[in-house]
Image: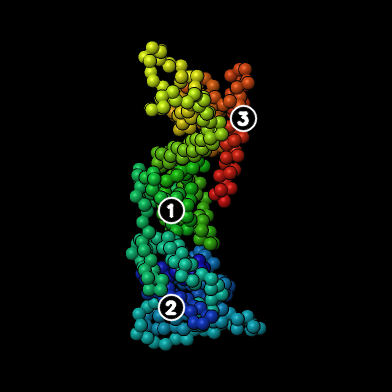
Amino acid sequence: MSIFGEPFDNSFDADATQISMSIRTKGNASSILIQDNGSGCANPLCMIQLGKHVVNRQKPLILGRYGVGLTKAAVSAADGVAIKTVRDGIARHLSLNWKVLQKQERWVIEDPSESPTAEPNGTLIVFQGLRSKASLNDKQLEKYMQKLALQYMPAIRSGKQILVNGKALPVFQHPEMEHQKTADLDIDGHKARVTMGLVPEGRTIHHPGLFVSFGYRVIEFNSRLGLGDDPTPGLCGEIELGDQWGLGTLKNRVIDDRLQALSEEIHRTFSDVIEKARRRGQRVVLGKVSDDINRLLRQIGEEEGPKKKARRPGPKNPGSGTKKSTGLGSPHRRSLHTQPGDRFKDLFNRASALAFAFANLGADGPAYKLDGNCVLLNADIPAIAMDPHNEVKVSIHAIHALATYWIVNPGGFQLRLFEEEQNAFDRISRIVGYLMTRLELTANASDKESA
C-alpha cells in the first residue's frame, strides 16, 4: 500500500490541509478512496495519461516532481481509477479501466467531462478493484497507519491532517533526549536543519538513527548520515532538508554531489553527541562480554566444584550431636586450607561477578589492570582499542586478562584440569584456549536457544 503515497504527495503540493483515505470492501471487491481539500486540478487527464507530459504551474512542485507518478501507482495497485476534481466552480470527471484499455488496439483515454458546481475545491481519487487484499485486514491496516504517520510526520507536524477510515493519524514525537542540540547547516546554499540527542539509558528507542525528511514526508529512516561507522546506541534525531536538495525517483534517498559535505559537517557539528553515543556503544559491548564470560564461569563452577567436604566421624555426644569440648585443644586454624568445603565456590562466586571496562592506562602502560572485580582494558594501546565495538575481539582481550588474573592472583581459583602445567606461561595458554573454546560453545548454545 506504500504506492498510495503518490496521491498524498500530489495533494500536499496542491496546498491540501486535509487528506482522507477510506477503504471499502464489497464482497470480493475492494476499493480505496483518497480525497483532499486542495486547489483541485484544471486537467485531470495529465494526472494519469501515459508518457511524459508538461503542466504549466505558477507554484513549483515539492514532492510531485519526483516519484513514479500517479499513473504507475494506479496501474500497479488497481484495475481502474476514477477521478473527480473541483477547481474554481468547475467539476471535472475522468474514469479509466486498465483491463479494458489494454484490449484496445490503440490506447485512447477520453477527455474528462466538465460541469459547473458550487462544491469547494478539492480532488477525489478512487482506486477500484484492488489487486492486493492481504493488506486490508485490521492488523495490516494498523501497521500501515503507523507507517503512514511516520512517513508524513513533517506534514502532520506542520498542522496538516491525514485521516484513515475517519481516524486521524497522530503527530509523531521524538522521545525525550539528553544532550540534545539543533543546528542549521548550509552547504553551498543547500539548507539542512539537524537535531539529535541521546535517549536516556534504559529507555526503549523504537527508531534509532536519524530521520531524513524532505518537504512533507520522511524519505529515509534509520539514517547514519554523519554518524560514522561505530555503533551509536540511543542516538536519534532528524535531518530536515531544504527543497534545494535533489531526490531519487523513488523518493527514498538524496541524489546530490553535496551529500558528502553535509555528512562531514554533521559529524563536525555534532561530534560531542556522537562521541557520547559511541562510548555508550562500547559499554554495551563490554556489558555483553561480561555477561558471556560470567555465564561461562558459572558453567565451569558447576562442573568443577564445589568439592565434597572431608568425611568426619559421627557425633560423640548423642544428646546434642556434637563433641563436648575439653578446652585443652588448640584452635583449628588450618581448617580453611586443609578442608576444601565450599572454598572453590566462594572464590568462583567472586571471580564470576567480573566486569570489564576500557580505561586510559597510557600507551606504555599495562594491557590490563584489575580494579576490584573490574578488569580494565587499556584503551591507549592501539591493538586493544582498534575495534572496541567488536564483541569477539574484545572478548579475546578479556579472556587473556582473566587467565592472567587467575594465575597471578593468590585469591583466584585454579582449574584442576591444568594443575599438571609446570610454569605460568603454559597454564595461562591452556586456560586461554580452554576459555575461548568454551565461550564459543556457550555462544553457539545461546544462539540455538534464541533461535
Name the residue that disc number 3 marks. 433
Say what secondary structure mark 1 lies in. loop
Q: CA distance from mark 3 to mark 1?
A: 40 Å
Q: Nearer the viewer, mark 2 or mark 3?
A: 3
Residue 131 versus residue 263: which sits nearer the camera?
131
Mark 3 and mark 1 lie on one chain; the one further toward the N terminus is 1
Label 2 or label 3, whichever comes before in sequence order: 2
**Residue at 54% from the left image edge and 21% from the top image edge:** 407
Give the mark, 2 or 1, whose residue is nearer the N terminus.
Answer: 2
Query: Mark 2 touching mark 3, by CB under 8 A?
Result: no
Q: Secondary structure at mark 2?
A: strand
Mark 2 and mark 3: Cα distance apart in space: 71 Å
Q: Nearer the viewer, mark 2 or mark 1?
A: 1
For badge 1, the amino acid type reads His
Mark 3 crowdedness (10 Å alpha carbons): few <14, some 14-19, many ≥20: some
Reply above or below: 263 against 105.
Answer: above
| Residue under numbered circle 2 | 124
**How far apart are the two marked residues, 2 and 1, measured between alpha carbons?**
35 Å
How many numbered marks appear? 3
Residue 164 picture location, percent across and down: 41, 71
302 or 384, which lies in front?
A: 302
Percent of width and height locating residue 41: 43, 76
Question: How many other residues sit within 10 Å of disc 2, few (<14), some (14-19) or many (≥20)?
Answer: many
Q: Is residue 354 above or below residue 193?
A: above
Q: What amino acid is found at the position of numbered circle 3 in the picture?
A: Gly
Residue 258: tell me if it is visible. no
Question: Going 52% across and 28% down the picture, which residue do you hit?
Answer: 308
In what element is the residue under mark 3? helix
Residue 53's x, y, as percent?
54, 72
- Residue 206 shows which numbered tag? 1
Indicate which label's residue lies in the foreground, 3 or 1: 3
Q: Which quadrant of the structure image shows residue 270?
A: top left
